[in-house]
Amino acid sequence: MAEDLSIVQGDKTAQYQSIIPQIKALTDGEPDLVANLANTVAALKEQFNWFWVGFYLVKKDELVLGPFQGPVACTRIKKGRGVCGSSWAQAATLIVPDVEKFPGHIACSSLSKSEIVLPIIRHGEVIGVLDVDSEHLSHFDETDQQYLEEIISGLNFED
Ligand code: SME
């Protein structure tokens, strides 16, 4: 496909339903993981203009920063630390309406106010997380969870 995106206005469901097939078209048939993660976060950033969106990948006993869009961020996060490390430890999606109320939240930027972190699970193991930050409180809900899980499940981590 041509490497330009169609960006839509409207509610978040309409936005996800527009961007998901475009992410699929960008990543299907491309085996390179970094290229696919990079285009996925770039497409999400263009559609939603979130403050920060990116991947952390499990390497040995830490999460290590992967492709992202937004301000520079913490490079390494231990299991169980912060929202990302907690999502990894619990193998569960965490929706945090107010990051200041999350014990141990890692503030890469004081501008981030709410956050959603989804684990990427393959063969029963968490191999990374997708982290999205907003500068608005209570920005993420189950609609984001549902569609972001769909995006994650479509990514090929087997290369
Ligand atoms: N806030 C995250 C750290 C990653 S940055 O937000 C990009 C956390 O508490 O795990």
Image (cartoon, rainbow, N blue to C red):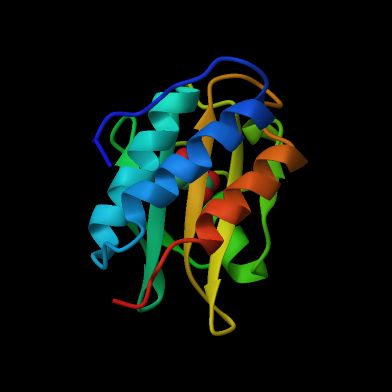
Rendering quarter of residue 137: top right
Picture coordinates of residue 110, whole percent (x, y): 47, 24
Which residue, as the protein is rendered here, is positioned at the far bottom?
123
Q: Is residue 29 above or below residue 151?
A: below
Picture coordinates of residue 59, whole percent (x, y): 34, 73
Question: In front: 18, or 86?
Answer: 18
Picture coordinates of residue 153, whole percent (x, y): 55, 63
Q: Is residue 91 left or right of residue 156?
A: right
- At 49% from the left edge and 58% from the top edge, which residue is drawn? 129
Rendering quarter of residue 70: top left
Which residue, as the protein is rendered here, is positioned at the far front?
1
Q: Is residue 12 above or below residue 121?
A: above
Q: Quadrant of the N terminus?
A: top left
Rendering quarter of residue 95: top right
Picture coordinates of residue 65, whole percent (x, y): 32, 54
Q: Quadrant of the C terminus?
A: bottom left
Residue 81 seen in render: no
- At 51% from the left edge and 68% from the top edge, which residue is drawn? 79
Question: In front: 123, or 127?
Answer: 123
